[in-house]
Amino acid sequence: MLIQAVLLLVPGRGKERFAQLYWRGIGHILGVRVTTHGKLAAHRPILFVANHASWLDIVVLGGVLPGCFIAKSAIAGWPVISVIAKLGRTIFVSRQRERVRVEGKLLAGRLAAGDNIILFPEGTTSDGSRILPFSSTFLALADDPARPVVQPVTLVYDGLDGLPVRKRDRPEISWYGDMTLAGHFARIGRRRRVHASVILHEPIAPGRYKNRKALAAAIEALLSVEAARLRQGR
């Protein structure tokens, strides 16, 4: 935390690279192994659009993607976790309709500064057996003057203690509903190994879709198909 705090004060991408190293280290401690397919988009800024099933997604994607997460504003008040999130330059949003314009400008400012952004358009987590409907609100960033490329990302947990993940195993990994963070963290800690597969899909060039709703629908369909394929072991 001290190293990252210092890196935040100096120019360059050290703070971004160190954050990735940090999350990879946390993943190693937790026994999380990641297989990545595909390549990162070559041009910045990038708006990464991913599915969301667990707090563990932050660990996995934080180690793979060079970017800042968007998180719900409530997390900014959580003990310890809020400090780690702020050091990682997380952008907190309320998703309230009256705040969308202001928060959109904040996100646009990050893109203009060259930062990549990691977005979970489902807005919440599920049991991981399906992808929830996407909200198109912040996908309006795809039309920002910074002209970010949009890169869809599929994440599926497909291995648990060396065996394929079955439907009944998903609550061991996915964090949703009224599950407590401490209780779920303890269940993950009892496991020897969790395997995650991440697909970095081909980037979507600015202007390919007529509006943000069409873009959201296209990415939701793509991730739904690819996540189902990974869950089936294909």
Image: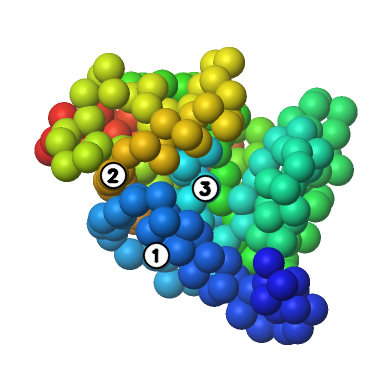
Q: Looking at the image, is mark 3 or mark 2 earlier in the sequence?
A: 3
Kindly report which numbered mark, 3 or 1, lies closer to the viewer in this rendering: 3
Residue ID at (15%, 36%): 163
Query: Count the marks: how many?
Result: 3
The residue beneath circle 3 is 58
User: Would you call the spot at circle 1 few (<14 residues within 10 Å), some (14-19), or many (20 or more)?
Assistant: some
Residue 95 located left or right of residue 220: right
User: Would you call the spot at circle 2 few (<14 residues within 10 Å), some (14-19), or many (20 or more)?
Assistant: few
The residue beneath circle 1 is 40
Snapshot quadrant of residue 111? bottom right
Q: Identify which amino acid the numbered label 2 is placed on.
A: Arg
The residue beneath circle 2 is 192
Where residue 227 sits: x, y (%)?
29, 34
Q: Looking at the image, is mark 1 or mark 2 earlier in the sequence?
A: 1
Q: Is residue 55 visible?
A: yes
Residue ID at (41%, 40%): 189
